[in-house]
Amino acid sequence: MNTEYAVELEHINKVYHTRHFFYRDEETGRRRWYTKKTVHAAVDVNFGIRPGEIFGLLGPNGAGKTSCVKMISGLVRPTSGNVYVEGLHVEKKRLQVLRRIGVVLEGTRTVIWPLTPLENLNYFGNLRGIRGKVLKERARQLLDFIGLKDKMNVQVRRLSRGQRQKLAICIALIADPSVILLDEPTTGLDVQSSHAIREKIREMTRAFNKSMLVTTHDMFVAQDLCDRIGIIDKGKLIACKTTPELLDVFSDKTFEFRLDRIPEPSKFLSIQGVQSVALDENGEGPVLVVSVEQEETIRSAALYEIISLLRDDGYLLKSVSMRQQTLENVFLRLTESTTPSVKPIVSAENQLERRV
């Protein structure tokens, strides 16, 4: 256990066995069981979430994201390994752990539609042991904070999807948990609602030092919101780095030179350090796309020589930019790889994020 983390998964394994049975045998009266499939939802998974950090857990459908969330919240027991929340073992101290966790499920399933937002918060607050003046003040403060103060007495069924999602976040916060688990918090929302919820998640994390775990399929949301990202595929944690570090993993060091006229790409291939050259034309004029080596000294010399050659040939250089990597590209390249020799990409800053 590492005291640096509010949430810690330590060598977690989870195996599901799906079983089906035949109809009762007419002669013996017995049912015949057989194991249909064994699913490894988590294979030696190690990661931690610090206080004040937003951690994104990404992966394809069936990769094991939901199983990890359920093991943190105590809904599912790991086959082996340990899960800690603020130093408490989730299985051994389950009630104490539940007081420290708030969960927002996909599809606002924690919201009771016939009730108003204020009634929802009063109901769930009582379930969590918050009562009286404290509950009343906290409920109104949360509704004001999230932007639902003017809707507190309107039935949930009459609210928009974005407003219901905001209410689900308030319900998760009513007991003032230190750890919040968000399952697809922006799915199906319009641009304005998605942006508003991301801002509130960021504000809650920074202002109140909460630990956030976000699962999402939206790569833009993950890239914009998360401080650190773990990518899980087939139960294995194949990447765990800060968002900038992860974006730099497959950085091809490709540069775009926007020019006034079409150049001859082949003449740049003889420059040392240049790996490939291509031409891209759009409405703003021709663009020379050059990929160079990763080594800094060689790359620098190659760029200087490219610019010098363009100047000598009389080209007007309108702009130079490095092509930015996106989280979606990194995600696809990691999860689509089927090569057994591909190594997990994890941060070397501590032993927790090291797969054995």
Image: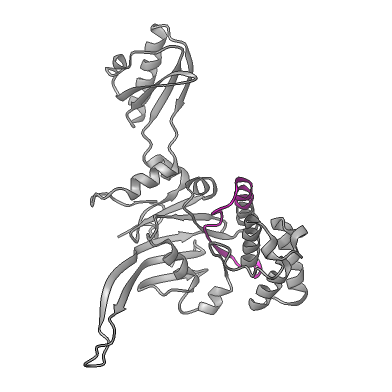
Whether 64 is drawn above or below 220: the answer is below
Q: Residue at x 27, y 73 (%)?
A: 36
- Which of 120/259 is in front? 120
Could you say where residue 256 lies in the image, as x and y percent from the top left? 42, 24
The magenta span reads: 174-199
- Colour basis: one colour
Can residue 2 be seen here?
no
Q: Is residue 193 magenta?
A: yes
- Which of 346/139 is in front? 139
- Which of 298/153 is in front? 153
Residue at the limit of the structure toward the left, as seen here: 27
Quadrant of the frame with the C terminus: bottom left
- Which quadrant of the structure image shows residue 57? bottom left
Left or right of 224, for residue 140: right
Q: Residue at x 71, y 57 (%)?
A: 145
Q: Is residue 96 magenta?
A: no
Whether 260 is drawn above or below 37: the answer is above
Could you say where residue 84 lies in the image, as x and y percent from the top left? 47, 70
Residue at the limit of the structure toward the front, as seen here: 26
Left or right of 328, for residue 127: right
Left or right of 194, for residue 296: left
Left or right of 238, for residue 209: right
Can residue 287 be seen here?
yes
Q: Residue at x 57, y 56 (%)?
A: 52
Whether 260 is drawn above or below 192: the answer is above
